[in-house]
Image (spheres, rainbow, N blue to C red):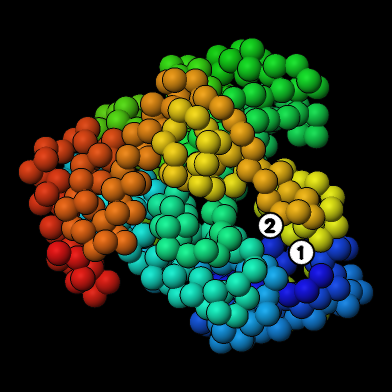
């Protein structure tokens, strides 16, 4: 194994677990992991954690730490990105502005106004990375964790030949949740999932080779279970299939659950995470405190004398690299260009489909037609994504406004004039990245 470049390696949410995943794969031990972050403090924490893991596991892996992105990328075989360009404030302003017009998002980042803010702030940084990859390691496989995943993946595939895949953990996360709902060991279950990111459908969900949907529907009748995941159970009840991502995320991707406070309260999880209280902007102070505490915990683990508990997690990255290096087949769900993979979604858009990996690379799987009701909801998301990609790449303000007008939640509560005013206000306050748009 050669070199893995990890851009954004100071990530408090990803770095430690991804390093555990990589370092517990024997096929990845012979090589270099180059950790890069704009924060010297944070990259040093991750480097210390990685060095501690290498020592505990008695590995030959070389760990590098740098704030120089080009140094990290030089000669890399694989590149991971978990960057967050503007820290905590990436989507705060857009959520607050949209709320003034009655669009009450929860987390933001995938559709509507907050997708616009995230995409315009993320894409230039991702383009800097891929331009460096083109020069320094053109054959590298680039895996990026960045929302809005479909928009950014679509844009990257339009402007660069670099092999890139948008990554997420909502498929395997949802699969694990479903096993808890039906009381099955995860190793006895199987799933086949496709659609668009955060709105992909469990087309098959099985336990010991048998369809597990009848049992899942039976469990949905239990209030203890239903009230942990109200929105997704409602989507399954009305559209026939369980959907990826959480209820609080999914409540903002469709027009049915967040048009007013009464609906938000009605469809908020009663025993799980409350969709009505996790709005990113209003929870900012709590978020800051939690992240600060997380940094202190990581410092203690990295620089303290206690041994680390090293356990591989569920992220796909290390499985992908391991399959290419060892020829041990691996399947994951990735966000890739729709080259006939889902036949009733538009060609050229970005879809989330099963992908097989071996020593020949990543092979996205043919899915065929989605059930028509599922495809229809996905096509609505894709239409907004297409306009957002056009607007950002061509600096076309009107296309971005049209994308926001197609956002299901914004369309449910705003007139077109209000959406125009909302968009104008966004452009007036969101900083220098937006001044190019006319």
Q: Can residue 25 be seen in this view?
A: no
Image height check: is 154 above or below 233? below
**Residue 76: percent from left, percent from top:** 68, 75
Q: Which residue is drawn at 51% across and 82% down?
A: 38
Mark closest to the chain's N terminus, 1 or 2: 1
Q: Which residue is drawn at 42% across and 20% down?
A: 373
Location of the C terminus by quadrant is bottom left
Q: Name the residue beneath numbered marker 1.
A: 22
Location of the N terminus by quadrant is bottom right
Image height check: is 200 above or below 157? above
**Residue 53: percent from left, percent from top:** 81, 72
Q: Name the residue beneath numbered marker 2.
A: 317
Q: In this view, does 237 lie to the left or right of 58?
A: left
Q: Residue at x 42, y 58 (%)?
A: 158
Q: In which quarter of the image is residue 365?
A: top right
Q: Residue furthest right?
A: 58
Q: How many marks?
A: 2
Q: How far apart are marks 1 and 2 (CA)?
A: 8 Å
Q: Is residue 260 left or right of residue 234?
A: left
Foreground of the two, 402 or 14? 402
Q: Is residue 301 visible?
A: yes
Image height check: is 71 above or below 126? below
Say the numbered circle drawn on residue 247. Answer: none
Say what secondary structure mark 2 lies in. helix
Q: Which residue is drawn at 69% across and 63% down?
A: 18
Q: Quadrant of residue 418?
A: top left
Say what secondary structure mark 1 lies in. helix
**Residue 49: percent from left, percent from top:** 73, 75
Q: Tell me the crowding category of disc 1: few under 14, some 14 to 19, or many 20 or more residues within 10 angstroms, Cα based.
A: many
Q: In which quarter of the image is residue 395?
A: bottom left
Image height check: is 281 above or below 71? above
Mark 2 and mark 1 in contact (Cβ < 8 Å)? yes
């Amino acid at each position: 194994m050669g070199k893995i470049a990890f851009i954004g390696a100071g990530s408090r949410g990803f770095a430690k677990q991804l390093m555990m995943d990589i370092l517990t794969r024997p096929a990845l031990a012979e090589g270099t992991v180059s950790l890069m972050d704009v924060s010297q403090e944070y990259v040093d924490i991750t480097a210390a954690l990685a060095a501690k893991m290498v020592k505990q596991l008695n590995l030959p892996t070389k760990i590098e730490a740098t704030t120089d992105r080009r140094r990290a990328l030089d000669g890399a075989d694989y590149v991971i990105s978990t960057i967050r360009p503007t820290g905590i404030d990436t989507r705060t302003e857009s959520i607050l502005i949209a709320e003034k017009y009655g669009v009450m998002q929860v987390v933001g980042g995938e559709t509507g106004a907050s997708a616009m803010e995230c995409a315009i702030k993320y894409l230039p940084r991702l383009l800097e990375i891929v331009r460096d990859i083109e020069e320094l390691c053109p054959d590298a496989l680039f895996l990026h964790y960045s929302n809005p995943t479909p928009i950014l993946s679509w844009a990257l595939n339009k402007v660069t030949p670099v092999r890139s895949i948008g990554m997420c953990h909502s498929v395997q996360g949802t699969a694990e949740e479903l096993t808890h709902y039906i009381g099955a060991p995860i190793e006895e279950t199987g799933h086949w999932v496709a659609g668009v990111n955060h709105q992909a459908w469990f087309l098959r969900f099985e336990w010991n080779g048998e369809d597990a949907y009848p049992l899942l529907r039976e469990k949905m009748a239990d209030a203890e279970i239903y009230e942990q995941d109200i929105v997704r159970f409602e989507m399954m009840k009305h559209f026939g299939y369980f959907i990826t991502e959480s209820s609080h995320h999914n409540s903002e991707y469709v027009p049915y659950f967040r048009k007013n406070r009464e609906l938000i309260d009605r469809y908020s999880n009663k025993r799980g995470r409350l969709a009505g209280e996790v709005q990113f902007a209003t929870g900012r102070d709590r978020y800051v405190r939690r992240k600060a505490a997380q940094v202190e915990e990581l410092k203690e683990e990295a620089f303290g004398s206690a041994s680390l508990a090293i356990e591989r997690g569920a992220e796909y990255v290390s499985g992908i690299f391991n399959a290419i290096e060892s020829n041990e087949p691996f399947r994951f769900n990735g966000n890739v260009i729709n080259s006939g993979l889902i036949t009733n979604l538009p060609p050229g858009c970005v879809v989330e489909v099963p992908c097989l990996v071996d020593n020949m690379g990543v092979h996205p799987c043919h899915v065929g037609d989605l059930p028509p009701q599922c495809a229809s909801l996905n096509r609505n998301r894709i239409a907004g994504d297409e306009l957002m990609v056009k607007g950002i790449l061509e600096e076309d303000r009107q296309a971005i406004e049209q994308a926001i007008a197609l956002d299901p939640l914004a369309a449910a509560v705003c007139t077109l004039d209000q959406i125009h005013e909302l968009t104008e206000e966004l452009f007036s306050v969101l900083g220098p990245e937006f001044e190019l748009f006319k």
